[in-house]
Image (cartoon, helix red, strand yellow):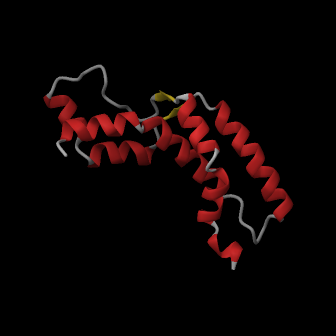
């Protein structure tokens, strides 16, 4: 895949990926050794509702670093894509489809984060 295509895919999935990153940060706090199952269940419901309402998120350090590591910024500079360059902390809009998709994955993301809870 050429870098121009990589850029398009990265940009098309940016809102979705930031939402997943946000959810992972929140579910990481729901340690089953420290929080009861009932509290986890309530937190997952609340987090799902939050995701549906997240119409925008800032570009995180990890996402920005990926943007740099993939040389997308360099491609944009060499192709004079000035207005579209990604900036750390820049607000990115999320689509309803992205929010719905991630909201449907909150429980699974928690389970993936804490697999030992099912042993």
Q: Is residue 29 left or right of residue 46?
A: left
Q: Is residue 33 above or below residue 84?
A: below
* Furthest residue in direction top, as rendered: 83
Q: Is residue 57 left or right of residue 40?
A: left
Q: Quadrant of residue 32?
A: bottom right
Q: Quadrant of residue 87?
A: top left
Q: Is residue 2 above or below residue 93?
A: below
* Furthest residue in direction left, as rendered: 78
For the image shown, how many numbered marks are present on the structure?
A: 0
Q: Name the residue rendered at 76%, 72% in the picture.
A: 33
109, 79: nearer the viewer: 109
Q: Position of residue 38 (x, y in %)?
A: 86, 60
Q: Position of residue 60 (x, y in %)?
A: 47, 42
Quadrant for the C terminus in the image: bottom right
Q: Name the residue rendered at 66%, 75% in the picture.
A: 116
Q: Quadrant of residue 12?
A: top left
Q: Position of residue 83 (x, y in %)?
A: 30, 19
Q: Is residue 102 left or right of residue 36?
A: left
Q: Is residue 108 above or below residue 70?
A: below
Q: Name the residue rendered at 70%, 74% in the picture.
A: 118
Q: Name the residue rendered at 64%, 46% in the picture.
A: 104
């Amino acid at each position: 895949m050429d870098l121009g295509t990589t850029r398009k895919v990265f940009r098309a999935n940016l809102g979705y990926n930031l939402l997943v990153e946000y959810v992972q940060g929140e579910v990481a706090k729901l340690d089953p050794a420290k929080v009861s199952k009932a509290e986890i269940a309530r937190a997952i419901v609340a987090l799902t509702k939050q995701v549906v309402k997240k119409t925008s998120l800032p570009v995180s350090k990890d996402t920005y670093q990926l943007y740099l590591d993939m040389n997308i910024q360099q491609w944009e500079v060499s192709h004079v894509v000035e207005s579209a360059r990604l900036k750390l902390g820049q607000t990115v809009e999320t689509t309803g489809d992205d929010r719905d998709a991630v909201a449907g994955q909150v429980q699974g993301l928690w389970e993936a984060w804490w697999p030992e809870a099912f042993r």
